[in-house]
Amino acid sequence: MDAKSLLRARKATTARIEHPHASYTAAGQLRCAICAVPVNQWDAHVLTKQHRQSAAREKAQADKAKAKRRAEEEREAGVKRAKVEHGGSDNDDGDDDSGPALPAGFFSAGNKPSVGGDDEQEEAAPAPAPAAPAPKPTGDAELDDFLASLNDDDAPTTAPTRRKGLAYKKTEEAPGVASYAAAPVLLNGDGAAAAEPEPEEPEESEAEKRARVEREEREEIVARLEDEQRAQEDADSRVVALKARMEALKKRRAAGKKA
């Protein structure tokens, strides 16, 4: 190999082609990434029909992927915008439903709503459990008495606790809407009944409402835990008492056998 060939080979190895489609193998061979062919002269390869077609095909695929990504982003933005607008329209409809004030005489005896119906349903006592059948006599008077005492202990000692869904319920009223709460009635000079308007309470903010709901939920959980703890303590005390009765019965029977 002459000096020119060596110089040309050295120059080809030292001067690397910087192009998005140019790549090199582990042996240092120049290749075209989109044509997947080895290349000796990069400038000449770029002008070939094969490379131009490969470059056009890759550009079309990139544009298609970009357009698809843009369409997905626009669709997601449209869905979010529709959700926001739908939420705002619901709030507007809720405000329109309030309507004007109710006419005079609406809260007469015939039009008063039933108050406390839901609370009575929530506080309804559960059905009592069926009584356990009486044990059959065994012939041993002391053993029969003990079994009868077991049935007596199974009866509940306290009435079931009745609780509402929430300990406290606050009536939320929109400003300008008549309340169902009974207002105090005063008599004017002519003897006619005149309703005294109740002072309007300040509207509760979202933070105050959220804090109140959390506080009521915590109070309900604490009350349930206390009820469960009392029930567990009652059950433990009954078990201890039954064990003591059983031991006393065994001792009396053992003493009777010795006698």
Image: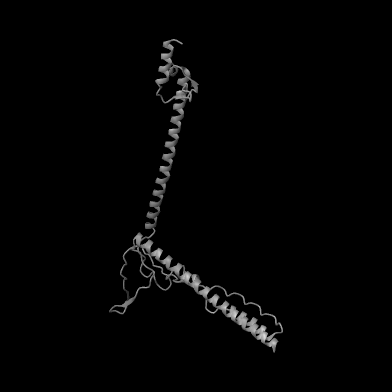
- Between 227 and 255, which is closer to the camera in this rendering? 255
Instruction: Give the left or right position of residue 46, taking residue 145 as reference.
Output: left
- For the question of whether residue 225 can be seen, the reply is yes
- Residue beneath the point at 47% across and 72% down: 226
Q: Is residue 7 above or below residue 66?
A: above
Where 96 falls versus 41 (above or below)?
A: below
Dividing the picture into quarters, in which one does residue 95 lie? bottom left
Q: Which residue lies furthest to the left in this view?
A: 189
Between 71 and 54, the residue placed more toward the observer is: 54
Which quarter of the figure is the C terminus placed in?
bottom right
**Quick check: 216 above or below 35?**
below
Front residue of 257/110: it is 257
The residue under the point 68% across, 86% down is 141
Q: State the image coordinates of residue 5 (x, y, percent, origin top left).
A: 43, 12
| Position of residue 34 measured from the top left corner of the image (x, y, whole percent) | 47, 24
Nearest the camera: 181 or 14?
Answer: 14
What x and y, as percent, mark residue 234? 53, 76
Where residue 160 appears, as percent x and y from the top left, is 52, 75
Total numbered labels placed on residues in the image: 0
